[in-house]
Image (cartoon, grey):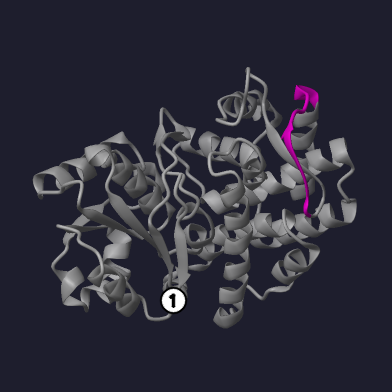
Amino acid sequence: MSQQQTLLTSTLTDDLKKTLDGKDFDKIFILTDENTQKVCFPILKTEEEFNEATLIVIPASDSNKNINTLTTVWEKLSTEGGSRQSLLINLGGGMVTDLGGFAASTFKRGISYYNIPTTLLAMVDASMGGKTGINFLGLKNEIGVFNPPSKVWIHTEFLKTLDSKNLLSGYAEMIKHGLISTVKHWNSLMAFDLEQIDYKLMQQLIGESIETKELIVNQDPLEQGIRKALNLGHTIGHAFESFAMQYNNGVYHGYAVAWGLLCELYLSHLIHQFPQKTLQQLLYFVKENYGGFYFTCNDYETLYSFMLHDKKNKGGVINFTLLKDIGQIEINQTATKEQIFETFDFYRDAMGI
């Protein structure tokens, strides 16, 4: 599988135009959702080349990352003359880059695509690494393929368009990167002021997150081994997301990851003696910034059943990525049902739920 090229840029339209001048695409499509069309697309629209591109606009929010929305994108690509020599530019957050990447990967058996992530979550996670897909039957990313974009353009000016919840959602993935990399990176993330944001420092931290993810993805593009490190916090986090979706009360992906990280670090403490001091540090950070996810002991079985559907599982056994310490990764870990339920008890007690 080819490797993507990730570029941090402060001159997005100029850099994009220079790249396209050397390519021979017969048609350019730009995929946005309703929000990014209003807030972010005008930046591209200033260049005639992008103003003349075919715009595809889909509804916003993760609830629309489904087969019906995907079909509308395929239809637009087909009816507007898309061919195997066309380019799809995905301009938006993780929902747009996930769904758009899957649409590009399957239309005409695959066309070229670029990602221009506009949210912090997409910049450090969703737009990178080649995972594409949609939600299906109430399950996160149940259908999809591995296929990296040719290029990912990181333009941090887009971060100034985000509200605090969207910023925090992306920051949770950066926290995960800190936990699986170095103590220095972790400490930098814990010390960063999320209320008075230094965007220059934020760009540096984003660069470090991207380096962490790319290093792992390049070693294991198809998630057979060490790439599973990037799933830290996601086994339980995805269960929280699916649980919320079941009740039409969706939560931000990064919030679910933050809560999942807290649970899975507790499991790491139970099974691998992960340091309690770092666990408490994360607990304080999550409590202060993300609040809590409400569920009762009567919901444990439902959450557990969602975890049984996780794509990382093998032979019906729930698969975790756990840590012995910061940067000391243990993939393909299991836990008993009792340990998982104990983790839910810890979470509810610690968060005061």
Q: Which residues are magenta?
A: 327-338
Q: Residues within 10 Å of mark 1 (few under 14, many from 20)?
A: some
Residue 215 or 248: which is nearer the viewer?
A: 215
Residue type for callout 1: Thr
Give residue 230's position: percent from left, percent from top: 63, 47
Give residue 44's position: percent from left, percent from top: 26, 73
Residue located beneath label 1 in the image: 9
Is residue 287 on the magenta stretch?
Answer: no
Residue 263 or 73: which is nearer the viewer?
A: 73
Is residue 337 on the magenta stretch?
Answer: yes
Q: Is residue 119 visible?
A: yes
At a point 42% along the width and 49% down the height, the residue shown is 148
Q: In this image, 261 relative to 308: left or right?
A: right
Give residue 47's position: percent from left, percent from top: 21, 77
User: Image quarter for residue 338?
Assistant: top right
Give residue 42's position: percent from left, percent from top: 25, 74
